[in-house]
Amino acid sequence: MVSTNKTNMNNSNYLLVIDGDRELHQQLHPAMQQLSLTTEVAMSEQEAVHKIRTTPPRLILVSAELPEGNGYLVCKRLKKDQNNGSIPLILYSASASAEADFKKHRKLQHRADAYLKKPFHMLDLLDTMSELIAFPKPSPSRPKANKKDEAKVLDLEKQLAKEQKRCQKIDAELQTSHEKLAQLQQKNKEQHNNQQKLKAQIQSLQQVQKEEAAQSQQWAKKEKALATKHKKAQETLREYYKDKIKKLQVEAKAGEKLQEEMETMRQTILSLRQEVEAAVQENQKAKQDLEKERAFRKKLSSVLEES
């Protein structure tokens, strides 16, 4: 904690700067001395609350970027306090998204009384402060100031210019970092989307594999059933043809026997035919002999009658 004048602080004639960086306090202190004001710096919210409860300041400046905590939340809690919520409060930020953050914060119930984007000129800060508390608006030129004060002012202006350049450089680096972060976030988002798509594809493939496995099991069951049916059909056909062959073999044997019997009958018929032919020939011969005997008897009878 940096204290400048406890007497003035007890008279509530001081400004409280809540910032982890003492540089703004060091820049603001000489200008406030010209207006008979002192400045106090609090490095944390706890230290700031202790100072405010001890002696409320005329105005509070809060950095949005605190080493421990969030300046926007500190602003909310201070403004929400019934005892000290009426103390004017200026919230400043060096973030690249400060303007957008300020726009959102202005819509809240417990908001700051003014907002500044770092880096800012000391005169802009003094102008903003003069709108919130009663003290003469500072002028860029101070004709009544002595040479020592003018040298301090010139030194401060040089320090401010240097600080502005440093802040601008930091702001540019922050902007670049934000852009890189946005690109990384976009890449992460794309990678996440790709991972989700890949996960969905894997799940789909797993589902297809599961369905194919189930279908393969069904086909295996069907194939097994068909193999069983085929085996039974083969056995049935084997038995059928076996019986058929046996029948054919029996029929073939019966046919051979029948052929043998037919051959025997043929031989018998042939023998009978020969016997019949021989009998016919003998009959014809007997007929001839009988005709000859009849002719002889007739001739003999004729001769006998003539004699």
Image: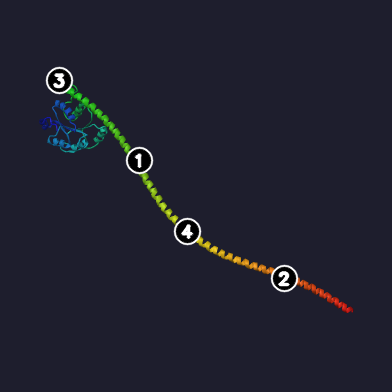
Image quarter of residue 107:
top left
Q: Closest to the observer: 271 or 70?
A: 271
Q: Amino acid at mark 3?
A: Lys
> Tag on residue 55?
none
- Residue under numbered circle 1: 194
Image quarter of residue 197:
top left
Of badges 1 and 3, the one in the foreground is 1
Sequence-earlier tag: 3 or 2: 3
* Above or below 145: residue 303: below
Of badges 2 and 1, the one in the foreground is 2
**Image x and y of residue 267, in percent:** 67, 68
- Residue under numbered circle 2: 276
**Image x and y of residue 218, in percent:** 42, 54
Q: Closest to the observer: 165 or 292?
A: 292
Q: Is residue 281 left or right of residue 109?
A: right
- Residue under numbered circle 3: 147
Sequence-earlier tag: 2 or 4: 4
Q: Is residue 11 left or right of residue 231?
A: left
Sequence-earlier tag: 1 or 4: 1
- Give the quadrant of the N terminus: top left
- Residue under numbered circle 4: 231
